[in-house]
Amino acid sequence: MANVEGMTPEDQQLVVPALQLLKGNEQAMEWRVTIQADAMAMIDYNQQKTERTEFLTSVATFLQSSSTVGQGAPELIPLMLRMLQFGVAGFRISKDLEGTFDKYIKDFETGIEEQKAAPPEPDPEMEKLKMEQQMAEAESARKQQESQAELAADAQRLQMEQQAEAARLQMEQQAKAQEMQQQQMQFMMEMRQSMQMFMQEMQQMREEFALKQQMDAEKNAAAVEAARAKAAAAPKETANG
């Protein structure tokens, strides 16, 4: 009877608290009983049929007229919906549909507000220009990346060449250092050999000189002895004569 399904979401949230209120402590409640004549009378189905037909006809006629107005002036649609809500509330038979009308009108108004808050539809020409600009920026970025890649490759190649040249120079320096070291070692060996030969020659010369001195000394000693012998022999010959 309450037509909960046709209520707005805000009204539906109040259904459970309302039931809890109705099922509360009866002693703490004060009841008000209202008796309406039409509620106590027998249901006249023909009258209901007539009222519903009148209601549907009025709504259909209004919707047809309002659709024409809405096509010509969309800004008047909310007003037409409020007028429809006002007209529906005047029919006793429409009580079961009032919640449905309220929910539809509220959802429609919410959609209009969202459309107003939504950004406007993009201009095709602007979108085309934007796309071309993005493509140009992408092409520029691609060329820049290619240029950076080429620069990086050149820098890497130059670095590799420098490293190779440094390694070659280092090898040459090492080879020259080894060659100089070998030359120094050979020079030292030759110097050592020369010193040895020189020492041997000096030793030989000393030995020859010593031998010569010895021979000269022996020769001098022999000459002295001969002279002495001759000197000693000379007076005897005189005396004998």
Image: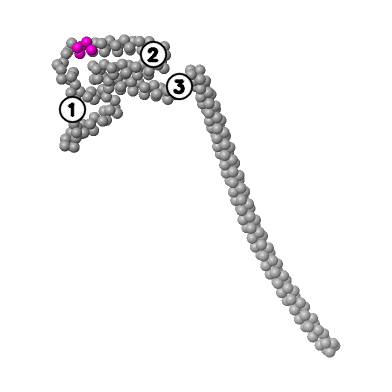
Marks 3 and 2, Cα distance to the nearest angstrom? 21 Å
Number of the label disc, if any, that sits on residue 95 = none
* Segment tinted magenta in the rendering: 47-51
The answer to whether residue 168 is visible is no
- The one nearer the camera, 144 or 3, is 3
Q: Classify mark 1: residues with Cα within 10 Å, few (<14), some (14-19) or many (20+).
A: few
Using residue 219 as the reference point, say whether residue 136 is left or right of it.
Answer: left
Residue 50: image x %, image y %?
22, 10
Name the image quarter holding the N terminus.
Answer: top left
Mark 3: amino acid: Pro
Relative to 33, say whether 93 is above or below. Answer: above
Marks 2 and 1, Cα distance to the nearest angstrom? 45 Å
Residue at horizontal 19%, vertical 25%?
Answer: 34
Q: Which residue is mark 2?
A: 70
Coloring applied to the structure: one colour
Using residue 105 as the reference point, say whether residue 17 is left or right of it.
Answer: left
Q: Which residue is mark 1?
A: 33
Residue 218 within the segment the image draws in magenta: no
Q: Classify mark 3: residues with Cα within 10 Å, few (<14), some (14-19) or many (20+).
A: few
Residue 50 within the segment the image draws in magenta: yes
Using residue 97 as the reference point, say whether residue 42 is left or right of it.
Answer: left
- The one nearer the camera, 121 or 164, is 121
Dot in front, 2 or 1:
1
Mark 1: amino acid: Val
Marks 3 and 1, Cα distance to the nearest angstrom? 56 Å
Dot in front, 3 or 1:
1
Q: Which residue is mark 3?
A: 120
Residue 19: image x %, image y %?
20, 31
Q: Quadrant of residue 36?
A: top left
Q: Quadrant of residue 157?
A: top right
